[in-house]
Image: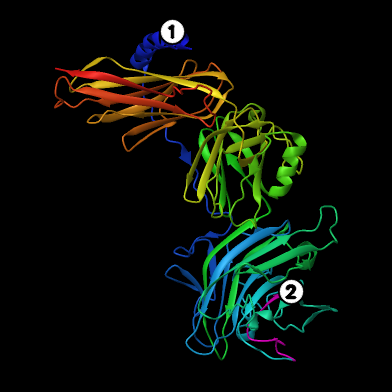
């Protein structure tokens, strides 16, 4: 190892000089296509972009960082609809936090509503006991009711603190729990136990924040007349432990499985502030199709998580489908296929405990779909918990995202995690496929060495270049490789580039912050070479004889088989007149 390393160092002295003389630094900023959010993603409502608020006067409006459906004023109604229809028939999860406050006696409540009425984004219903959704045809509402409209009629409410699921099919919806849709009840489910001061008691209108999660699981594929399952949790209390049996695809007249989603609220003789504080909506199997231009990062936004792709050729249309996957099923599949044993798919927030697999289907007339190099990334939120360890980005070459799929490669190039919002990045070729971000991957050893070279002397007031040569001596290929260079104190950073013997140099994978330049290599095969060139300026005021110390280091997800790792190298240069 020592003699080979010495040989490589000598060779790099010659190649480093030629590289430094030949380098032309070209700054290429990856253009990002600006897109409106495809699904509701509101950590708060400091912006109400992509929302239609109705009625225009005395209805839903923005109050600071809050979406207020109604003020604490008598006889108000307000609705808020997301401007893009959402895929609901294939399953979804939506989570929102609400707060209901009042100066006097509270009434009447809020509702999460799915609707595909002819009124579309202008739809709104009755106030008071109608809670803003009564009268909207072709809709389903999950109401959070704060007032007792006793029966029989107008509502047949059990108490002033209950949650119900109401739908009259394609007919006008009703908040009356005794109403019928033909011979079928419009009340699909009711939880009236919230009114009793027992364990799990929740007061909807106590002025505190309450978080609701609504999850719809569709019927089994191939059984359109079967029922799906709607589940509602409130502050982690499962309101319908057996689920609500419903088939949205047959109950409502949907637009290719899609509908408008949003909120309604109402007040009557009594009133309250009906506020929504945050909202996320994630479809179980949502597809976004758009062009993916050459050397441009195209973003696919699925609620609270993203998929990004940067191809080296123009793609006419790239359809990306986000497929929610049960982590237990994923783990069982890995054991059955013996692929990446121990790997666990990463659970994303606002997916009801699910992982997300991305199926990218390419359609292009120029043959790029089967001969393309591309960078992919997924950015997402994760529930609070321990940090992600040993991340990976798996690909199932040429296959759809279906249960039991075998992932045959790990394409990860880098991973970052700030607080609870990580980003997994990878690169691949020559075709698109199914991808999933994972953790707890077992990485094989890779002996990564680095040699950092520079001139032994430098004149003050001139530039000085460092060339760090990174080598992988195996026995395995290395993944998630990155090279860093901490420049000498007192010098000024000029530029950095990553170079290969075949593709030249590029500044694109390099950044500089807090005195350290970083270049993302990605994957490095056994006996592969990469060069990081960093240029600094030595100030004209530098004192002759000053020794400049520069340290380069290499890192990867793979462990180092050496007893004494040699993944860093420090070089020293003396300042002269």
Helix, strand or loop at label 1? It is helix
Looking at the image, is 86 positioned above or below residue 20?
Answer: below
Looking at the image, is 383 positioned above or below residue 149?
Answer: above
Looking at the image, is 122 positioned above or below residue 439?
Answer: below
Within 10 Å of disc 2 (Cα), the crowding (few <14, some 14-19, many 20+) is: many
Q: Which of 37 and 65 is in front in this view?
A: 65
Q: Position of residue 198 (x, y in %)?
A: 64, 80
Which residue position holds label 1? 7
Q: Specify the segment rendered in magenta.
A: 152-166
Q: Position of residue 369 (x, y in %)?
A: 65, 31
Q: Where is residue 170 in the image (x, y as percent from the top left)?
A: 76, 71
**N-term-proximal mark, 2 vs 1:** 1
Q: Is residue 374 magenta?
A: no
- Seen at 54% across and 16% down, the residue is 527
Helix, strand or loop at label 2? It is loop
Hey, which quadrant is residue 313 in on the image? top right
Q: Does the magenta stretch include residue 153?
A: yes
Which residue position holds label 2? 167
Give the quarter of the figure containing the C terminus: top left
The answer to whether any part of residue 319 appears in the image is no
In terms of secondary structure, what is the magenta stretch mainly?
loop
Hey, which quadrant is residue 406 in on the image? top right
């Amino acid at each position: 190892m020592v003699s080979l390393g010495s040989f490589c160092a000598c060779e790099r002295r010659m190649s480093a000089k030629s590289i430094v003389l030949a380098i032309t630094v070209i700054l290429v900023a990856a253009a990002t296509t600006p897109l409106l959010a495809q699904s509701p993603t509101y950590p708060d409502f400091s912006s109400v972009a992509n929302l239609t608020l109705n009625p225009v006067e005395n209805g839903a409006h923005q109050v600071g960082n809050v979406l207020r459906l109604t003020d604490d004023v008598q006889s108000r109604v307000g609705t808020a609809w997301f401007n893009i229809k959402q895929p609901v028939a294939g399953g979804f999860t939506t989570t929102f936090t609400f707060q209901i406050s009042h100066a006097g006696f509270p009434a009447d409540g809020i509702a999460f509503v799915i609707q595909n009425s002819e009124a579309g984004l202008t739809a709104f219903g009755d106030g008071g006991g109608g809670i803003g959704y009564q009268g909207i045809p072709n809709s389903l509402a999950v109401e959070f009711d704060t007032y007792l409209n006793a029966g029989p009629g107008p509502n047949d409410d059990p108490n002033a603190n209950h949650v119900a699921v109401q739908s009259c099919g394609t007919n006008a919806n009703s908040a009356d729990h005794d109403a019928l849709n033909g011979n079928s009840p419009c009340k699909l489910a009711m939880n009236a136990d919230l009114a009793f001061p027992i364990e799990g008691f929740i007061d909807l209108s106590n002025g505190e924040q309450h978080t609701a999660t609504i999850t719809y699981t569709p019927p089994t594929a191939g059984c359109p007349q079967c029922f799906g399952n709607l589940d509602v949790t409130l502050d982690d209390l499962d309101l319908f432990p057996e689920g609500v049996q419903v088939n949205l695809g047959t109950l409502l007249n949907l637009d290719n499985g899609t509908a408008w989603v949003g909120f309604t609220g109402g007040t009557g003789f009594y009133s309250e502030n009906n506020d929504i504080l945050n909202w996320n909506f994630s479809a179980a199997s949502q597809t976004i199709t758009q062009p993916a231009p050459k050397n441009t990062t195209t973003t696919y936004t699925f609620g609270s998580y993203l998929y990004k792709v940067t191809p080296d050729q123009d793609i006419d249309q790239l359809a990306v489908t986000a497929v929610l996957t049960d982590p237990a099923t994923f783990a069982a599949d890995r054991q059955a296929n013996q692929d990446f044993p121990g790997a666990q798919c990463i659970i994303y927030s606002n997916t009801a405990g699910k992982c997300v697999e991305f199926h990218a289907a390419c359609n292009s007339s120029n043959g790029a779909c089967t001969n393309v190099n591309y960078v992919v990334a997924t950015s997402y939120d994760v529930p609070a918990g321990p940090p992600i360890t040993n991340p990976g980005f798996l690909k199932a070459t040429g296959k759809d995202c279906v249960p039991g799929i075998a992932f045959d490669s790990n394409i990860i190039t880098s991973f970052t995690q700030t607080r609870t919002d990580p980003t997994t990045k990878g690169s691949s070729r020559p075709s698109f496929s199914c991808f999933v971000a994972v953790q707890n991957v077992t990485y094989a050893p890779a002996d990564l060495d680095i040699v950092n070279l520079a001139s032994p002397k430098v004149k003050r007031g001139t530039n000085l270049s460092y060339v760090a040569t990174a080598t992988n001596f195996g026995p395995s290929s290395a993944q998630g490789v990155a090279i860093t260079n901490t420049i000498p104190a007192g010098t000024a950073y000029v530029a950095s580039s990553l170079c290969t013997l075949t593709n030249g140099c590029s500044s694109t994978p390099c950044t500089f912050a807090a005195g350290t330049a970083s270049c993302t290599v990605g994957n490095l095969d056994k006996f592969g070479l990469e060069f990081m060139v960093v240029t600094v300026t030595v100030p004209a005021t530098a004192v002759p004889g000053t020794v400049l110390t520069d340290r380069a280091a290499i890192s990867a997800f793979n462990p180092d088989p050496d007893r004494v790792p040699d993944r860093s190298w420090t070089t020293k240069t003396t300042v002269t007149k």
